[in-house]
Each structure stands twice: as C-alpha cells, then as structure tokens.
Image (tube, rainbow, N blue to C red):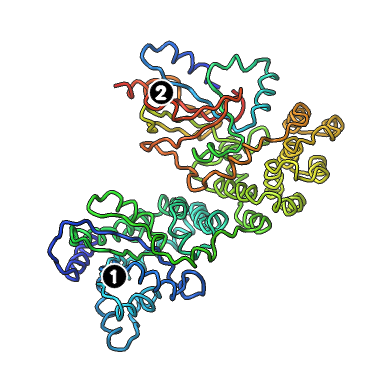
Amino acid sequence: MVIRKLLTTLTAVTLTLSAAASVDEPNDVIVMGMIHSGHRSAGPYDIAHLKDIIRRVKPDVVLTEIPPDRLQTATQQFHETGKITESRVRVFPEYTDALFPLTKELEFQIVACAAWTTEMNDSRRATMAQLKTTHAKQYREMELAQRNVSTQVESTLGSYRDPRVIHTDAYDAFVKVGMEPYDRYFNEAIGAGGWSNINAAHYAHIAYALDRLKGQGKRVLITFGSWHKYYIKEQLRQRDDVRLVSLTKFLPEESTAAGTGKSKDAQTLLTEFADSWDEANWEKNFRGVLYMRKTGAGQWQQRMTTLRSLVLLGDDAVPALTDALNSPHSPTRVLAAQALSYLGPQASIDRLLSTAKNDTTAAARLYAVDAIGTSGKAPSVDWKALAGTERNRDVRKHISYAMQREDNAISEQVIDALKQWDPATINSAKVGSPAPDFQLKTIDGEPISLSDYRGKQPVVLVFIYGDT
Amino acid sequence: MQLGQLRNALRNMKDTTAQILAVDPHEAWSAKALLRESGSSTDDVSFPVLMDPSLTVSATYGVPFQMRVHTELSNRPATFIIDKQGVIQFAQRAETFSDRPSVDKVISVLKQLDE
C-alpha cells in the first residue's frame, strides 16, 4: 500500500520536470530549512527575509514539501485568485506567502516532493495517542529530547528562528540527537509516517527529481522543514552528481547580525536548565541501573552545553551563579557550584563556604568545596572545622584535596578548553567514523594527541571515572 | 579496574602494539592525590593517564554526568578501539558500573584489525 502510494506520487514528480538536455554539469543543491508558521513572526527569518534569501539563491528548480497530488490545485488557485486555500499547502507560509508570489518575478519550477498523505497523518496521530498511554515512559523521554533541541540551540547557537543558526551543522546535530528517541521507540509502530520512514520517503521524491535533473548544471533549492534538513543533507552527501552548497552563502549581512552572537544571560541559562532537568526520573534511573544513567538518555548533553555557556559568560555569570547557590532546586545548586569551579578567583568564597557547610545535598557541598579549591583561595578556609562536621565521606575526601592544593587555582588552559570546545561535536564518536581528535595532558603534564598514533598503532581509549 | 590486566595481556601479545590511553575527568593534582592515597605513584601506571578536567573530550565521546560515583556526576565508563587509520572500530559505553569489554574481547578486536 505504502509502496504503491509512493510510486504514484513519484510518477507525479517526474511529470512536472521537463527533461532538458544534459550539459554534463553537476547541479548545485542548496538545502533551506523552513520554520513554517515561524516565518509569519517578525525576525531575521520572516517572509520578507525569506523572499530576499530565495532571490539571492536564484534557483532554477525548487523542490518543496508539497505533496504531488496537491500542487496542481494550489498552483491553479494562486493563478486564478492570488490566494491558496488548498488545505495542505496553506499550512506552509513559505509557499503561500513567499515562493508562489516569487514566481511572478523569478523563473523557477516548483516540484512537489513531500511523501505526506492525509491517511499517514491521521494514522500517525491515532498511533501516537495510543503510545502515550501504552509507552508513557518512552513518550516522556521523546518529549524531553525534542524540547531539549530548542534549549540547546538557543543556549549555544543563538535564536532558534535565525537562518544563520538554522543552517549550521551544530543545529542539525542537535535535531538529530533530539529526534533519536522518537525514531527509536516509535518509527516502526507509526509505520509510513514514522520519523525514519517519512524522511526516507521524502528523500525518495527528492532523489527521483535529482535523478531527472542529473547533469543539467542547474541550481536546485530544497525547502523542507528545518528538522528534516539533517537527514536530507546526509543523503545528498552520498551523491556524486550534485554539489552541496551551503545556504549561508546566500544570507544577507543584516541577518548575520540579527539574533546571533548575543548570548543568553546566566539567569536564563539556569532557568532553562531547571525547567528541563528531570531530577525525579534521573534519580529513579540511577537507582535502577547501579547509579548509571541509561545510555541514550539525553539530559547530560544539555547539562554539558549549559555548563559551557555559563563558563563562556565568565565574570558576568558569577552574580547569577552565586544566587543560584540558594536555589530551592538542588540540581541547579549543584550545577551552579560546578560552574563556579571553572570561574576561578571571581567566585565568592563566603557564599561557597556557606554551601559547603550547610547545603542538604552532598553533591552541592562537594562541588562548592571544589570551587573554593579551584579559586586558589583554599588557604583562607578552616578546612579542619569543615571536615569535622562533614558526614559524607566523599565530601571529606574533596576537602582533603582542597587542603592539599593550597593556593593552586585551576589553570587557564582548562577554562579555555571548555570555552573553546565546539558543542556541535558532543557525542560524535561513532563506530565506523574517524575518532574525534583531541589533545590532553598526561597526569605528569606531557601533552598527547590522539593523532600522534595515527598511521603508527591502534589505540585502546578507556574512559575512567577517577579510580585507576 | 582492568586496565592493568589489559596492559599485561597486550604486552604478551607478539604482534599487537596497541597503545592504551586512559582518560580521567579530573585535574592532575587530584588524580595524584588519589594515587598517593592508594599508596602508589604515577610511575606505577605504565600507560598515559590523560586529564580531562574541562570534560570536553569526555563530552565529545559521549560520557559525562551519566554516573553518580563518589557523590560526583562522573563519566560513564567507556572503551573505544581506534585502528591505525584513526577510525573507531569498537565502542562500549558501560550499562552498569563494571561493564567493560573483557581483555579477550579487546584482544580479539585488535587481532581482527591486524588481519
């Protein structure tokens, strides 16, 4: 059934493409991520900007997220009345308000490449409603992971609705990670409308169109929802008959400035972290599998990118982090104390000491002790008195480390490494792929790079938690 | 930990010259303090222990904040085998506290690389 449907729509794709003579020149392909109703709000990716970007691209062909059986109606409506009421196409302002109107000033062909059908949509909705009760846990994990995408994008890249942010590899990486639980748990159950399935079906239409255009030296613009973009680009990279061109080449200067480059303040970062961090489930998971989070649980990634963003703010983050030591939310206190341990002498020793003495959460006390140590002001603290009242063995251990480090503050190199780390590389080590290179110092201070061994010997890389 | 075991086994293998690298998510001085506490010194560790206090390599390899140990949110134990060309051929991120590939498993993966 699905296959037959696909074949029918593929035939429709073919029919709309004129078979021009091949000039044996690869096509330039540009993938543009759409934010649908988001284009209706003011901002660097509103309808006016969108039209401007498409003008700069000057495409010969535009492959769209319009189903082949809807394109004709929409086109006809636009020519007759200037408006599109066709039920599917009208949900895409990028087509009704930008692409179709642009046909009056630019010459390009619109090709329908969406595999979407009403039946698929209805069945997906019904299945998801069922799964919400039958697979409540997985459903919740899926929701959290999807919500994390916008939080991570906004905390590390900038506005979620800025084309310069949307068209980065980092954005694609966040989306891919965020959609992974949805895909893993539910793709099969949903069937044709499942995430991998619909992506593959959309791409089958795109591939069919590109096959027809092969060797014509055209400029092909692909306009799909921005969350589909990573998949489409992954597939396109495997084709040797197209040149993949980044959309960022066509962005006007002003949208470069708008919305990006300005980082969030520490308070916002902490609030977003608190909203997303699911402590109850985290604790439950910890107990369930010997203090180990389930592999694939995504929250650590948000914690890591938030930590880095806080440290990136430097001195500006210190007041909010110091206040957060009194947050009623214990994971926020733990994170704040840990972030302060990377901010060196700027941290307030009195407030950290108060956390180290009084916090009811052992991890907050432990990281507060660490932060006093890394600030280089350890000698000013009466550690013996603190150790005397501390009931947690691990915290007492860290107190002894803080005493031993005396006035040795954390090295600038460590702070810089965290600041310069590219969050897009998070969790990027995969079997079959090149191992992400790194340089670290040994316990004796000698720098070693993974690439030192390339071409010479294999490496067994073992991550330990501290006890060797 | 089975790092020592693994090192000894590799040493006894004629043809494999794999390098073991351990990554520890702390500053060097705290790792040294730990070693001192356990009565050993850095000389007793015959493979490089790389310090990753910024947690950036740990994050790139997908392991931070996934295990609660010694009250910290620490790294999930994990093992990666990287071939001579720099490609990851094996990855195991622990599901439980002591979930490590056996020495035999590591050696068999390394032997396959040689073929």
Work out whether A103 lies above or below A320: below
Residue at 75 percent of width and 53 percent of height: A319
Q: Position of residue A112 (x, y in %)?
A: 27, 69
Viewer-proximal residue, A405 or A124? A405
- Picture residue at 46% right of the left edge, 61% below the top: A164
| Position of residue A14 measured from the top left corner of the image (x, y, whole percent) | 18, 66
Instruction: Name above or below for residue A1 compared with residue A443.
Output: below
Q: Residues within 10 Å of mark 1 (few under 14, many from 20)?
A: many
User: Please, what is the three-letter code of the amino acid marked with disc 2?
Assistant: Lys
Picture disc at residue A388: none
Chain containing the residue with disc 2: B
In the rendered structure, find residue B105 and report the number of the disc placed on it.
Answer: 2
Q: Amino acid at mark 1?
A: Pro
Residue A257 in view in this figure: yes
Q: Which residue does the numbered mark 1 point to in the structure image?
A: A67
Quadrant of the image occupied by residue A252: bottom left
- B12 horizontally vs A62: left or right: right
Q: Is residue B96 left or right of residue B33?
A: left
Tell me which chain the residue with mark 1 is part of.
Answer: A
Residue occupying image coordinates x 42% and y 20%: B18
